[in-house]
Image (spheres, rainbow, N blue to C red):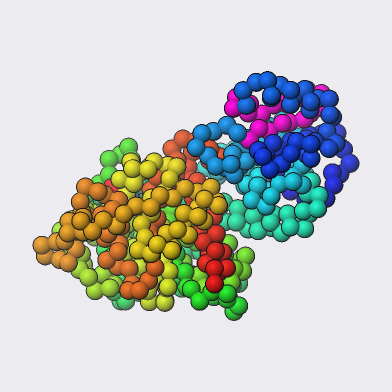
Amino acid sequence: MKLSIVANESAKKDNKAYALFFVKESVQFSNILSDVATTQVESVLKGMKEGPFEDLELLEIDGDNTIFVDAAKERGLSNLDHLRMAAYRLANRAMKKQLGCVNLFLADAVDEQFKAILHGLYYANYKFDAYKSKQKENFDVTFEIVAGERLKSFKKIAEDVAVEQKAVTLAKNLINTCAADLYPAEFVERAKTIAKYTPELSIKVRDMKQLQKEGFMGHVTVGKGSSREPYMITLDYKPAKRTSKDHLVIVGKGLTFDTGGLCLKPPKSMPEMISDMSGAATALAAIQAIATLKLPIHVSAVCCLAENAIGNKSVLPGDIFKAKNGKTVMVDNTDAEGRLVLSDGLAEAGEIGATHIVDLATLTGAMVRALGYAVAGFFSNDDELALKVINCGEACCEKFWSMPLEEEYADALKDKFADLKNTGSDAGAISAALFLQEFVPENTAWAHWDIAGTAFVDKKWKYTEYGATGFGVQTLIQLAREMSSAE
Ligand code: BES
Ligand code: ZN
Ligand code: ZN
């Protein structure tokens, strides 16, 4: 895909098509139809008015190769998400039809609408066929965006969106890669490469020996059963010019595979566990973009990488360890491993001076059952941060729902021998969040995103095929942007 942003439409080429974006309310037909064969467009418009609007998806007019995109179809999507969908469909159609150039008349679109359209185009161009014996290139369509007077601002937006989408693609690729090819040490290599090519980023890596030495025993307890050693990565981006005093630390669960350990998972739910490092992948991708965009705020990312495997060194149910913050934990269920690595990730966030922590984790099956794949549940000890999460999510078409840190369930985490155990009440997602809260450094605003449902889909959903959605990358970037401009 190529994007060409121009003030006025370039000369007509043979294989050029027109895509008319019908942006509800804010873009008038009359403004976007300028050069298009008017009689044909009129007939389409007439057809639209006569038929039920919701039934129209994508119309083509024979002869002049004009594609008409209708933005309103799916239920439950915001206006911006409808636009993403429309652009996604349009790009897919254009690639299938091998159109050389598609014109989008967007001079009247507002910034957010323009962004949403770009998102849709990028999503259509994502595919993960690394494991197919034959790879097929997407047909290289040029999307000519006619921007009119918005030329300069659209060009800047397109540059930023390119950086953000590169990060989304990075996260998706990492998440979709199977555990044989992406294990903790390999994730470390990928992160090092990213740090090397992103000069604004510094990286610190701890191997198992180091983790053990420094007392990150939650992490070690989970990772020691595998022949593939656990690692903790801390990435730091501290720009010289900052408009915010805040230090945002993103902590990601990075289970490159979760067999469940000795409390083995049933076979049906296991293959998807290649995605159990979605939190870490999302954290890495987001900080790469934040650093590349040079957002004026201090941001770090902590990736807690381990493989929850069965081996003769695996943690045994009933084992007790002392976490980095000094609390002792009895491992009641080896499949509740995410909260154990995160307990140390949260401690690390405190050690490096976080004022705000966002942790992301494919943490509980309970969250999948509660909210499904369209909405991520999150927990927070800070109302201001919680509101920001919801608003930033909305701006990025990522839905968040605030869940309660219900104290009444806290006692269920108490153990007879140790301070805590790693399972709690039947309210599975809440119990996991309450467990994490025990490890949040004092006086720190914290939000925990349980992305177990939203990170990975088992069937096509909106603009995502089977697999990773990239959920969270854009909201994290937006959050850093918001936090840097709030003061
Ligand atoms: N990685 C899983 C959670 C998960 C489930 C992610 C489905 C994505 C899709 C997590 O480590 C887990 O197994 N949690 C257990 C906790 C339980 C044993 C207390 C769960 O939710 O069943
Ligand atoms: Zn598990
Ligand atoms: Zn897990």
Residue farthest to the right, as pictured: 11
What span is in magenta?
54-71
Q: Is 64 colored magenta in this rendering? A: yes
Is 300 rendered above or below residue 93?
below
Q: Residue at x 66, y 29 (%)?
A: 58
Nearer-the-camera pick, 335 or 187: 335
Residue 156: horizontal and vertical position, in percent?
A: 71, 59
Is 282 rendered above or below residue 100?
below
Q: Is residue 151 left or right of residue 290?
A: right
Residue 23: horizontal and vertical position, in percent?
A: 67, 39
Residue farthest to the front, as pictured: 25
Q: Residue at x 60, y 78 (%)?
A: 241
Is 43 rendered above or below residue 441?
above
Quadrant location, the C terminus: bottom right
Q: Is residue 315 left or right of residue 271?
A: left
Q: Is residue 56 left or right of residue 31?
A: left
